[in-house]
């Protein structure tokens, strides 16, 4: 079985002690393709290193994460713009991400977050790339912004989708896929409802490693080798085989991010 982890941060220092072993475990679990969203200028060197050390397995994104939007966000955006316009040698970005709005921790830079999201969204459209959206406590705000930008449809994923079924339907209608991660294994999560009821063709699997570890590994560091745990939960919720979840979600990832082209 082949899986794609459409969202992980294996370049994070949480893996500095055993990165190669974590990658080996992922490959053994059938997770041969891992997509790497960037955070900001401080994470880019480690991301680039991982991509160049493991060609064929890791595919990078470029973007400024909403929690990294601060008083100096223009410089952060400039960094993203420069990378999109002239990617490092041999690098092909699969998406602009992760970008979005996060009003959970801090709302100080709300306007700046909006501005950074809008501009990066337009760069993605200009570059013909999908977007990877991070939305936390800001679902209505992001839907409003997408409406204001005014495209009839978008290309991308709402990663770690935490909205209601209604919001999921709205996202899919706008052209987005829904990122299903470890939260789907938590009791009473709305993500489980979404994973059960939305068309399988609109779902992507992701870990967000090192964060959001699925049960029964909760409390430990997350890693890409846990993708089959998430996939099994989706299979159980829908009453279909693990094989079917693997096939369809992998095809979804290949289509959205144009992997293997
Ligand atoms: Zn992430």
Image (tube, rainbow, N blue to C red):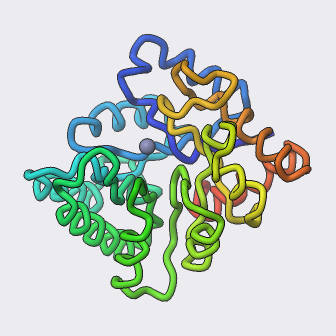
Q: Quadrant of ligand 1?
A: top left
Q: Quadrant of the C terminus?
A: bottom right
Instruction: Look at 40% across and 56% down and name the residue there.
Output: 137
Measured from the top left, where is residue 66 in percent x and y?
29, 53
Quadrant in the rendering for residue 109:
bottom left
Q: Nearer the viewer, residue 10 or 93?
A: 10
Please tell me whether residue 126 is drawn above or below residue 194 in the rendered image: below
Please tell me whether residue 72 is drawn above or below residue 15 in the rendered image: below
Q: Nearer the viewer, residue 15 or 81?
A: 15
Q: Quadrant of the N terminus?
A: top right
Q: Seen from this angle, which residue lies furthest top?
A: 17
From the viewer's perspective, is 214 left or right of 244?
left
Instruction: Look at 40% across and 83% down and name the residue there.
Output: 147
How many marks are shown on the rendered structure?
A: 0
Instruction: Look at 67% across and 28% down and name the residue there.
Output: 215
Instruction: Look at 64% across and 53% down and name the residue there.
Output: 190
Please tell me whether residue 220 is drawn above or below residue 104 in the rendered image: above
Measured from the top left, where is residue 117 in percent x and y?
30, 65
From the viewer's perspective, is 171 left or right of 216?
left
Q: Seen from this angle, which residue lies furthest front?
A: 188
Measured from the top left, where is residue 220 in percent x and y?
55, 18
From the viewer's perspective, is 221 left or right of 70?
right
């Amino acid at each position: 079985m082949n899986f794609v982890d459409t969202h992980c941060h294996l370049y994070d220092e949480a893996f500095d002690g055993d990165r190669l072993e974590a990658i080996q475990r992922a490959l053994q679990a059938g997770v041969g393709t891992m997509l790497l969203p960037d955070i900001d200028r401080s994470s880019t060197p480690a991301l680039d290193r991982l991509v160049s050390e493991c060609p064929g397995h890791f595919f990078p994104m470029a973007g400024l994460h909403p929690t990294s939007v601060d008083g100096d966000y223009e410089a952060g955006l400039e960094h993203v713009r420069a990378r999109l316009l002239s990617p490092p040698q041999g690098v092909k970005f699969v998406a602009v991400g992760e970008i979005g709005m996060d009003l959970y921790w801090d709302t100080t830079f709300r306007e700046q977050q909006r501005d950074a999201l809008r501009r990066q969204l337009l760069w993605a459209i200009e570059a013909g790339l999908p977007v990877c959206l991070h939305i936390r406590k800001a679902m209505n705000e992001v839907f409003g912004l997408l409406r204001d930008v005014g495209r009839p449809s978008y290309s991308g994923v709402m990663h770690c989708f935490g909205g209601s079924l209604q919001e999921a339907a709205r996202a899919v209608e706008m052209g987005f896929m829904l990122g299903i991660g470890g939260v789907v294994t938590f009791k009473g999560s709305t993500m489980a409802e979404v994973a059960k009821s939305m068309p399988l063709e609109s779902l992507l699997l992701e870990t967000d490693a090192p964060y959001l570890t699925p049960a029964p590994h909760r409390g430990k560091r997350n890693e890409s080798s846990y993708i089959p745990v998430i996939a099994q939960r989706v299979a159980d919720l829908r009453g279909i085989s693990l094989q079917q979840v693997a096939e369809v979600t992998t095809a979804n990832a290949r289509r959205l991010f144009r992997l293997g082209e």
